[in-house]
Amino acid sequence: MEAPVEAPREGDDVLSPYRLPYDALLARSIGTTSVPVKFDWRRTNAQIAATGSYLVELNNFNGMRAGALVRVPSSGAILEFGVSYAESWDSPSSRLLALTPYRQAGHPDRLELDVAVGLPLAEGVVTTFPKVFPAMEMVFNAYAGLRYAVYPAAFDHLTPGEVLGALVAPSLSADEIDNLNDARLPAMQIDPGRYGLLVGLGDDLYFKSGFFLSPRWMLAVPLLEPVTHTELLVWTDLSLAAGVAF
Amino acid sequence: MNRWVIVAGLALGCRKAPLHDLGAAFTLADVSWFAEEETLFVFYELTAEQGLNAESVVEITWTTDDERMPWTALSALPSVHTHLPVNCGPDTRCGSASVPVAKEPRDVALRFRYHPDGELALGAATVFNVVGSGPPWSHRSLIAYGVLDEKNERIQWRARHQFPTVRNQRAEELGLRRAFTVRYPAFGTAPLATPDNPYGYGVTCPDTWTDAGFGEIGTSERAIFYPDPLPLGASTASTVCAQVTVTDATGTFTTGEIARKNPEVRPAFPVLRSPIRDTTHLPFFLGPCDRTISPEHEAMLRQRLQLGDLPTTCTDDWQTPGFVPGLVVRFREAVEAARPAGQDMVLVVALNQDERGVSAAVEEALALVVPEERHRTSPRLAGAFVLDSDIRGITVPELSPVTLWCPSTFYGDVTDASTRSCAIAPDNADLELGPFSFGTLPILPSRDQYLEFIDQYSVAQAGEVESLSFRAPEFAATADHVDFGAFGVVTFLNNEAISAEPDDAFSYCLTEDPEFVVARSALLAASDGYCEELGLPYDTCEAGILSLELLPDWHQYFAESSYDIGIAWDFPFLLNMRYEVVAAGSVTAFGFSVPFGIASSTQSYYGTEVWTDSTYSLGDELTQCDRFCDHPTFDSAGVYHVTDPFAATYAHNCYRPAYPEPGDSGSPLDP
């Protein structure tokens, strides 16, 4: 509620009618964001989030991921450590492909470990639509990350030494691929890539309470293909993380 | 620049994942039809790159005079026999099938359908065989036979797949299992197997054979043991015959089968013992008493032969006529004085001389004493060991088989024991490196070598003998020696002999150990002309000596009842010398030499290695079969070689059979 403006009296300064208290001026200048969001993500200790994503690979299989994410602000950037379960399933096209002698590269169900770093490119307080949602702080990040696929069934019948070797090898061995034969989809040829390099963009939307949303778009770049021998060179990951910063 | 590289890389990678042909191909597509069984057997194996699916099926089609079978999954057809699912690997599909087909099929073909709901299939170059009617051992897909364990007591009945293009074990690997039952086993002796039918499948069991008293036994694996052993009464029986029943598309088929006993084989002569004893040394130091040649060298001779302060036997009068007889008397007196102690003896003689002729005189004396004792019964003078002052050899031929004369030199092709054991080079070259020089001295050197060496490196660097021991065989009163002069002696120690029946068979196995043991054939010794026919050395033939290697063939042709066993040797004793040898060095500067050296202990053997062991194990070298020698048997891998009887196969091959045992798997190795 604005304070009533007192009418200038005779003999007063001609500017008197235009004088306003500072609070009133401040309220007018800020407008609808009159209550500033002062959430400082850099001062949080850690952020925990649940994450889910849809994998847009350039093959005929479908893939989704669900998992958890730990984020740690550091030196003006944010470090992320995640673990997800990724599941693949058939599309109508891949079902038809299974009737033929042809196969296409894909990934069977697996665990995925992610390490990423986010660099804020722009940030500020934004309003929302509809206005029933409170204003929030938005951070626009550029991301770069490494994704590591774990296939526990691939280690069946391997010696401890072979398992250790497989854990660091950039691509799946023939024995691992053989072990995964029962896990693949009928039209799938198991892609040997174990590591993936991703870059992308995303927003972090922080509410004053510490709750945050983080939608992002990640693009796999085939820089590691010479060592991973993956056939899925470029693909994207559309993800949304929701969590709490504290 | 870098920006464009990244853009280009992304552009290249931004493409759909390609499709790959999984590259399926048949590696086996064999079909056989057996008229006697009215059964069509199918064996297949298919490999691919990554991508074979569980839903994929193998289909077959054929045509007979009565029907045209459309493409049908093998799994959808009735099966005559059991076919286990086979895991051939993630990129391989394999298996087998047996389909009842009453009439001879034609246009038989296999194909691989990638998915039952799909239309695409991979055709196979199908191999099709027809086995018509005929004897069961050659015209049926399964034959049965029996084998016995090591003791010839327990019978293992076996089945063997018999397909035109697929081997027995391969058929099993592809999942085929055949049930068979055996009953009415009886034992007896008759040659039921024939060259055409080596397994004896399909024979008629004689009614006169003795019932073994076993019940029915059966399995769907390839082998099964009877739980009970054959009765003792079956010991002399060579064969067990039984009725075996197998199944096929027509129902069951029953016929006879046999199990032949294994050849009964044992070591022909497990161990030949020749007691080897330490001998008594009879020491002599021969040298001039009126003068001293070299005190350092004399000390070395005494040290080397461990003579201590033994009085010198004077050789000053070596040119007199009575020198040699006198020396002979001394030697014989020493021998006779030691003989009552009961041990064999060796004359140990140090010869300190610097005149031509002394050594020859000593040789002459030894030749009158040592050879005549060579073949006497123990205790005897086994031989002599002489350490001379010069590098010389033995010049009296009859002395060389019984005397070590050191140091010796090489005599061209002559290689008596002295030459082999004591030959040294006349010059002992040093290695010179600036002020340093390095050298070693043979432990039994000549005087010149020794004196030159100690002048350069000192006596301390010349090494020393720590011990001497002589070992010689103890000859029994019954020992029989066959002397081949310079070539050695064969001694038949104590009437050791191998007795054999005419139908026995021997197996000789070449071993890494040196061959010292030989056999003697009375027939060969008594017969003329065999040597020329057999290409054997005349001397050994004359004495009837055979190497063990020839014994299997000799017995096969001549079937003697007994063969003496003896040891071939070429020298009567073995000298073991332990000594310290020094790698000597010296450094010379300003006219002074300072010697130094590195000492190490070692030992050498002089004489012959025959006497290193007192037992000669012949168990692995010569084996003897005394029953069922014309029966087939097992090799070391456990494979039953049905067409290889022991007598003909193992005469010159090592016989190391691996027999089946109760508790073995039902899948014996039977390629």
Image (tube, coloured by chain):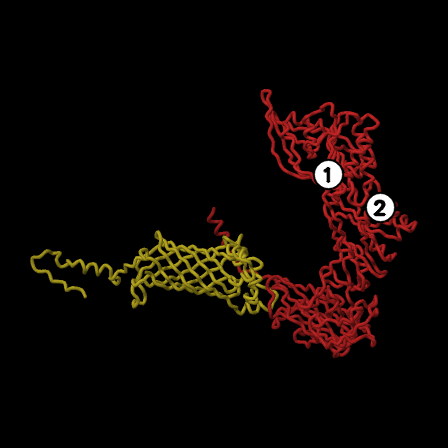
Seen at 74% across and 52% down, the residue is: B617
Q: Mark 1 points at which residue?
A: B281
Residue B370's place in the image compared with A63, above or below, is above
Residue B382 is situated, as x and y percent measured from the top left of the image, at: 77, 41
Amino acid marked by disc 2:
Val
Left or right: B331 in relation to A207: right
Q: What element carries label 1?
A: strand
Residue B605's place in the image compared with A142, above or below, is above
**What's the chain of the residue with tag 2?**
B
Amino acid marked by disc 1:
His
Is residue B588 or residue B50 the one in the foreground?
B588
**What's the chain of the residue with tag 1?**
B
Residue B297 is situated, as x and y percent measured from the top left of the image, at: 69, 27
Residue A104 visible from this viewpoint: no
Q: What element carries label 2?
A: strand
Q: Chain B is drawn in which colour?
A: red
Mark 1 or mark 2: which comes first in sequence? 1
Left or right: A81 in relation to B276: left
| Quadrant position of the N terminus of chain A in the picture | bottom left
Q: Do the residues labelled 1 and 2 touch (CB within 8 Å)?
A: no
| Quadrant position of the C terminus of chain A in the picture | bottom left
Of the residues tagged 1 and 2, which is closer to the observer? 1
Q: Name the residue under label 2.
A: B482
Mark 1 to mark 2 CA distance (whole Å): 27 Å
> Dot 2, how many residues are within 10 Å of its Cα: few (below 14), some (14-19), or many (20+)?
some
